[in-house]
């Protein structure tokens, strides 16, 4: 397939779905695509992740009026285009984490995910990413409907990753594609020892009072930007909102960096300083999630570092913890 055929496919999908993808403004951001000319074709890592398209920052769940209680779900069919391989991995992990969440699953059922790779993102070179080697052969461990690989000669190699993706390709006359059967989020040889296991062991050996966490705790302002920018932070809270005779229950993103989030009954809060919050954040990502899911809560996109006003570098910190 060539780019002309891809543009035709996207145009067809726009007729029946809301299309989202990377656009170039001051930075690369995810926006609704109303004109295909908006698409940024560099496919570098966008400022924000694609997480909010499947797990909105704020969403209504239930609505009660009088004695009637009903579930709220109002979303149009959507296409998420241009998902880079790191964000595709993050969406796969979220799918596992929210496998029994009805709101996530209903939204995913109305979503077509199209991944795209045009080579190694520049950020891998710029920040010397600490993740395992960037590899294209990880597709069988990622959930997607369609994946497009831009080759050196600019031809596009097409993969389908679901029945939904096959139907879209067949319906639009694209026959030259390869089926990829999803084999679960973990590789056959197990979690990556350098990225997953060594980071886990390094954090298990220390506490919030270690030099690394004391040092970064002294400069952290606990703003929570790192958590909100992360494609795999998924903590949320519920709020009941009253509007006249109607009450709506909403789910919204939150983070352990916010003081209200870590309060318990009676107003006690064991997380009293930034060092403790940072340690808990790292521990959850690299120890608890690895124990529970066999994968960490990090795909090495470096968004946390990019948005941090104090310049806290997660790659540097993990390296220091291992020395």
Image (cartoon, grey):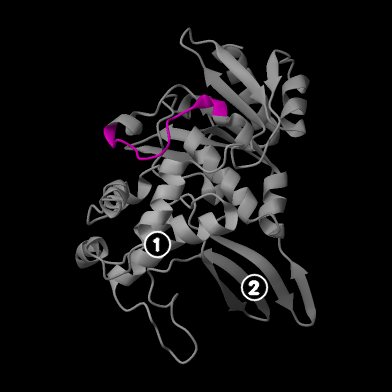
Residue at 40% x, 39% y is 131
In magenta segment, residue 206? no
Q: Image quarter for residue 99?
A: bottom right
Vertical placement of 307 versus 114: above or below? below
* Closer to us: 113 or 35: 113
Circle 2 — which element? strand
Query: Which residue is the site of mark 2?
Result: 248
Vertical placement of 238 versus 99: above or below? below
Residue at 56% x, 14% y is 156
* Closer to us: 155 or 66: 155
Circle 1 — which element? helix
Q: Earlier in the sequence, mark 1 or mark 2?
A: 1
Query: Which residue is the site of mark 1?
Result: 204
Residue at 64% x, 28% y is 146
| Left or right of 70 in this view: 302 | left
Q: Give the range drawn in magenta.
A: 126-137
Residue at 64% x, 56% y is 98
Q: Position of residue 316 (x, y in %)?
A: 26, 48
As drawn, which residue projects farthest toward the top?
153
Vertical placement of 17 versus 98: above or below? above
Return the mark for residue 40. Answer: none
* Closer to us: 36 or 205: 205
Q: Position of residue 270 (x, y in %)?
A: 38, 81
């Amino acid at each position: 397939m060539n780019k002309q055929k891809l543009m035709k496919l996207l145009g067809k999908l726009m007729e029946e779905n809301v299309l989202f993808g990377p656009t170039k403004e001051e930075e690369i951001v995810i926006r609704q695509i109303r004109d295909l000319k908006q698409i940024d074709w560099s496919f570098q890592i966008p400022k924000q992740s694609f997480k909010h398209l499947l797990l909105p920052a704020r969403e209504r769940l239930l609505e009660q009026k009088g004695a009637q209680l009903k579930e709220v779900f109002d979303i149009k069919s959507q296409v998420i285009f241009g998902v880079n391989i790191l964000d595709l991995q993050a969406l796969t992990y979220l799918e596992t984490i929210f496998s029994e969440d009805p709101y996530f699953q209903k939204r995913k059922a109305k979503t077509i995910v199209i991944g795209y790779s045009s080579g190694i993102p520049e950020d891998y070179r710029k920040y010397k990413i600490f993740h395992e080697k960037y590899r294209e052969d990880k597709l069988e461990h990622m959930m997607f409907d369609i994946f497009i690989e831009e080759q050196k000669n600019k031809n596009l190699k097409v993969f389908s990753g679901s029945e939904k993706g096959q139907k879209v390709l067949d319906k639009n006359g694209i026959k030259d594609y390869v089926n990829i059967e999803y084999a679960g989020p973990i590789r056959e040889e197990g979690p990556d020892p350098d990225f997953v296991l060594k980071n886990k062991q390094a954090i298990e050996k220390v506490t919030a009072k270690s030099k690394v966490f004391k040092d970064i705790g002294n400069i952290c302002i606990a703003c929570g930007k790192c958590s909100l920018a992360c494609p795999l932070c998924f903590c949320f809270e519920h709020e009941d909102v009253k509007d006249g005779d109607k009450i709506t229950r909403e789910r919204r993103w939150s983070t352990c960096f916010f003081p209200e989030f870590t309060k318990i009954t009676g107003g006690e809060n064991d997380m009293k300083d930034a060092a403790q919050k940072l340690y808990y954040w790292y521990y959850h990502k690299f120890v608890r999630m690895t124990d529970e899911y066999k994968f960490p809560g990090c795909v090495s996109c470096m968004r946390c570092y990019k948005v941090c006003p104090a310049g806290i570098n997660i790659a540097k910190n993990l390296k220091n913890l291992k020395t």
